[in-house]
Amino acid sequence: MIVVHHLNDSRSQRILWLLEELGLPYEIKRYERDAVTRLAPPELKAVHPLGKSPVITDEGRTIHESGAIIDYLVRRPGGGRLAPPAGGEAYETYVQWLHYAEGSAMLPLMLQLYVGRLGDASAPLQPRIDSEIANHLDYIEQALAGGDWLMGEFSAADIQMSFVGEVARAFGRLQDRPNLMAWVARFQARPAYRKALEAGGAYNLAG
């Protein structure tokens, strides 16, 4: 049985969503952030030394990092569903989205989250952060032009990238990006997304 070590207000929510889309059975082991520090509890270090979420355990394996978890679930228990066939050009594009989400797109948004707590002290950094956020969101906006999904049809790339869209919207960065705004509304309307939200609980992405 796949066990999702689920931290509230975290990227592990999209792992629950993927499992619902794939129709795979799973269990949730819940962890709560410290109400003051917002850090993960030390109990997560018993699962993986980094003490971070998402983490899954399956058949004696412990897998961390969202992209690696999504790749594993799609390839192995998912039988390749929600991904293009390996070896083709579409697959290479799909893999780029899996890595891009956390490797590039989330960085300026996370910087915004952290420096936003500094008040006036963040002023010297803000123009560069704003520029980088705009650069990445404009890139995704263009990628969605003329289509509903990043790969043309719905795939695990949309699930991996979903956190970027949701955090950007929470920061009020999508008003002039209609493709991105519509994409977020579209995936949030999916039955599997809603079922995963019921299972994992509501989350606050800008806090």
Image (cartoon, rainbow, N blue to C red):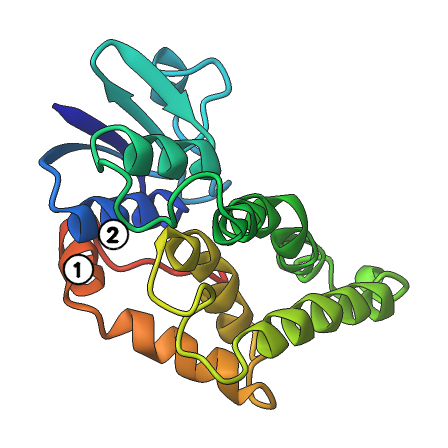
- Examine the rendering and report whether any part of residue 71 can be seen: yes
What is the spatial separation of the Cα atoms under label 1 and label 2, in whole angstroms? 6 Å
Tell me: 71 left or right of 24.
right
Name the residue located 12 percent from the left edge and 39 percent from the top edge: 24
Residue 114 at x, y percent in the picture: 66, 53
Mark 1: amino acid: Ala
- Examine the rendering and report whether any part of residue 120 can be seen: no
Closer to us: 47 or 118: 47
**Residue 167 versus residue 3 in the image, above or below:** below
Name the residue located 55 percent from the left edge and 46 percent from the top edge: 92
Name the residue located 9 percent from the left edge and 36 percent from the top edge: 25
Closer to us: 49 or 43: 49
Closer to us: 166 or 2: 2
Q: Which quadrant of the figure has residue 112?
A: bottom right
Tell me the crowding category of disc 1: few under 14, some 14 to 19, or many 20 or more residues within 10 angstroms, Cα based: some
Question: Do labels 1 and 2 touch, CB within 8 Å?
Answer: yes
Tell me: 155 left or right of 189.
right
Mark 2: amino acid: Trp
Which residue, given by chain and number where applicable, does mark 2 sit on? 17
Count up the numbered dots.
Answer: 2
**Residue 15 versus residue 128 in the image, above or below:** above
Q: Which quadrant of the figure has residue 134?
A: bottom right
Mark 2 element type: helix
Quarter containing the N terminus? top left
Tell me: 37 left or right of 21.
right
Residue 113 at x, y percent in the picture: 62, 58
Which residue, given by chain and number where applicable, does mark 1 sit on? 192
Tell me the crowding category of disc 2: few under 14, some 14 to 19, or many 20 or more residues within 10 angstroms, Cα based: many
| In the image, farthest residue toward the right | 124
